């Protein structure tokens, strides 16, 4: 069973595990900012989340009682009902189990059904086509492309896809996406 807990309600060991996941080469490869995160930087970030209540929330994903990933809503704007988002599987032992699709479904449902957003948006590196494919399958669409937007750790210029989905699209396609994400299995 997949459950979620706010990172602020998680103990130090789980919070530190999130930092280690974020510093892993695999997880960093999908991030815009690939700089290493020190323990002090991570603590400052955790502390900042408590000051951004309602603006940025991070939830740790658990399979049964084992933490394995993250979903988050950030830049939450309640006036225009929009937010940015992100997710990843941090624990390598949980790769290949289609849990990324489940995280994406739960993240999107959280944003639209629980948080009441009208539009959810994000960015995807042009060298992360697997994530882009999954997100398009989950009802997101490409709104733009920023060519040569960032410099990778290897010195290569990387483009960024701008993707989004509207609540009306989610409501219309939620059941189909639910079967794609294997909800209920």
Image (spheres, rainbow, N blue to C red):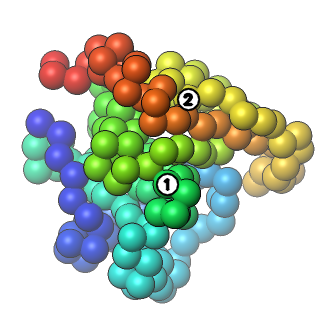
Q: Can residue 13 be seen by looking at this rendering?
A: no
Q: Is residue 16 above or below residue 142?
A: below
How dense is the environment of label 1, judged by Cα within 10 Å: few (below 14), some, or many (20 and up)? some
Is 99 situated left or right of 3 in this image? right
Label 2, secondary structure: give it: loop
Q: Residue at x 47, y 63 (%)?
A: 78
Q: How many numbered discs, if any?
A: 2
Task: Find disc 1 in the rendering and name its residue.
Answer: 81
Q: Residue at x 36, y 81 (%)?
A: 50
Q: Residue at x 60, y 45 (%)?
A: 122
Q: Position of residue 75 (x, y in %)?
A: 54, 64
Q: Is residue 88 above or below residue 44?
A: above
Q: Nearer the viewer, residue 154 or 27?
A: 27
Residue furthest to the front: 79
Q: Residue at x 20, y 72 (%)?
A: 9
Q: Position of residue 85 (x, y in %)?
A: 50, 51
Label 1, secondary structure: give it: loop
Task: Find disc 2 in the rendering and name its residue.
Answer: 140
């Amino acid at each position: 069973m997949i459950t979620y807990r706010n990172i602020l309600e998680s103990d130090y060991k789980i919070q530190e595990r999130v930092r280690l996941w974020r510093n892993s080469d695999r997880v960093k490869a999908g991030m815009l900012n690939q700089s290493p995160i020190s323990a002090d930087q991570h603590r400052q970030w955790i502390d900042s989340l408590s000051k951004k209540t309602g603006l940025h929330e991070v939830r740790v994903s658990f399979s049964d009682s084992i933490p394995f990933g993250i979903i988050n809503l950030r830049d939450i704007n309640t006036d225009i009902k929009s937010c940015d988002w992100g997710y990843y599987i941090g624990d390598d032992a949980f790769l290949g189990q289609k849990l990324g699709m489940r995280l994406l479904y739960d993240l999107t449902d959280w944003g639209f059904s629980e948080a009441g957003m009208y539009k959810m948006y994000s960015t995807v590196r042009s060298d992360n086509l697997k994530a882009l494919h999954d997100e398009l399958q989950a009802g997101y669409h490409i709104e733009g492309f920023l060519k040569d937007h960032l410099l990778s750790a290897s010195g290569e210029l990387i483009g960024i896809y701008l993707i989004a989905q509207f609540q009306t699209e989610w409501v219309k396609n939620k059941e189909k996406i639910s079967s794609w994400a294997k909800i209920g299995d």
